[in-house]
Image (cartoon, grey):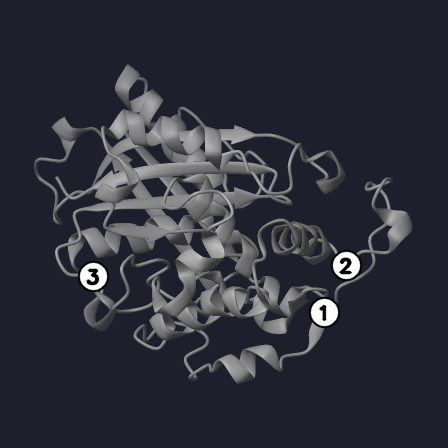
């Protein structure tokens, strides 16, 4: 392979959505004809146990956090303090993800999950227990191919169209996050939706980077699906589970389907499959619009693509 452009940015799990954004620029400018975005990892068998952080996190290290879990746990604790979000509402995210995973033959975790089981899981970094945390899996890879519309005429499959894409980074370490309750998605999400000419209520399927249960709540708020602080109540009662009002993480997400180090590319793959009608038992009826979102670092970098069926 001798690509005209090669990119291996390291902002984290959001980078794949950023690659879509960059590839769209290059394709539109005529600098390239085709882009391949790919990722694979065997992190499940190569990573040891969590360790207390040291350098290069000088402001966090003295407190002995388990990174990155403790950073996300801080955001969850703040959300609970500020808005009254409950442990049970976090549990709704994990249970919804598992319910979708039960419909996905490729998901890593397909056993039923009850609220009692969720609440009884082992505490890791308060308020996060084991079932608040994403999987660490092996043998998982994904890829997407992008080209211009004029080259897609002889396509073997119906194409999915990139209607909007945007990204933004606000910080590196959690101690420098401007606001633990608001991510960069609050800025780049509306930009991508405006490019697509769509509003949140016009989105049929939402694929979010659910590294932890709080992520789904924060990202739904920042994307405008509910007001800030209402995310916990928004996901309650199975609203984002199969049969709910908003299909979220329809493959089971990073919590129950797959998470081989970085999950962002898998949100794009699932969104594309939903828009093509390829998802079998978990297929969302008449899905025509989708969001695929990526998150990097400790809520540090966010990116989003808005995809449509036509």
Please rate how many residues cluster around mark 3, counting C-alpha atoms within 10 Å: few if below 14, some from 14 to 19, many from 20: many
Please tell me which residue is depicted at 53% across the width and 70% down the height of the picture. 88
Please tell me which residue is depicted at 72% across the width and 39% down the height of the picture. 173
Q: Position of residue 210 (x, y in %)?
A: 49, 56
From what the image shows, is residue 246 above or below residue 195?
A: below
Please rate how many residues cluster around mark 1, counting C-alpha atoms within 10 Å: few if below 14, some from 14 to 19, many from 20: some
Please tell me which residue is depicted at 73% across the width and 67% down the height of the picture. 48
Please tell me which residue is depicted at 12% across the width and 42% down the height of the picture. 155
Image side of residue 151 versus residue 100, left or right = left
- What is the quadrant of the C terminus in the image? top left
Residue at the extreme top = 29
* Residue 131, image quadrant: bottom right
* Secondary structure beneath label 1: strand
Depth order, front residue of 121/159: 121
Q: Position of residue 285 (x, y in %)?
A: 15, 61
Q: CA distance from mark 1 to mark 3?
A: 34 Å
Q: Are marks 1 and 2 in contact (CB under 8 Å)?
A: yes
Q: CA distance from mark 2 to mark 3?
A: 37 Å
* Residue 252, image quadrant: bottom left
User: What residue does disc 3 label?
Assistant: 284
User: What residue does disc 1 label?
Assistant: 124
């Amino acid at each position: 392979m001798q690509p005209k452009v090669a990119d291996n940015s390291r902002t984290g799990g959001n980078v794949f959505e950023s690659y879509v954004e960059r590839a769209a620029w290059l394709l539109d400018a005529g600098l390239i004809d085709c882009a391949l975005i790919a990722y694979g990892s065997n992190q499940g068998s190569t990573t040891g146990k969590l360790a207390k952080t040291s350098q290069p996190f000088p402001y966090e290290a003295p407190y002995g956090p388990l990174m990155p879990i403790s950073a996300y746990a801080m955001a969850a604790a703040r959300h609970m303090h500020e808005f009254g979000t409950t442990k049970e509402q976090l549990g709704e995210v994990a249970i919804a993800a598992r319910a979708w995973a039960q419909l996905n033959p490729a998901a890593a975790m397909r056993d039923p999950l009850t609220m009692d089981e969720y609440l009884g899981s082992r505490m890791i970094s308060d308020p996060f227990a084991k079932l608040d945390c994403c999987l660490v899996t092996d043998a998982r890879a994904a890829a997407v191919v992008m080209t211009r519309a004029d080259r897609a005429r002889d396509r073997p499959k119906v194409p999915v169209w990139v209607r909007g894409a945007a990204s933004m980074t606000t910080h590196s370490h959690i101690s420098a996050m401007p606001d633990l309750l608001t991510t960069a998605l609050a800025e780049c999400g509306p930009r991508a939706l405006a490019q697509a000419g769509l509003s949140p209520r016009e989105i049929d399927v939402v694929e979010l980077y659910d590294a932890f249960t709080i992520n789904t709540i924060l990202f739904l708020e920042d994307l405008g699906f509910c007001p800030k602080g209402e995310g916990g109540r928004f996901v309650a009662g199975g609203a984002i589970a199969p049969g709910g009002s908003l299909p979220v993480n329809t493959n089971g997400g990073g919590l129950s389907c797959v998470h081989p180090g970085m999950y962002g590319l898998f949100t794009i793959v699932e969104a594309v499959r939903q828009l093509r009608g390829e998802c079998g038992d978990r297929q969302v009826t008449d899905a025509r619009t989708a969001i695929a979102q990526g998150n990097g670092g400790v809520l540090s970098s966010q990116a989003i693509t808005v995809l449509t069926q036509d």
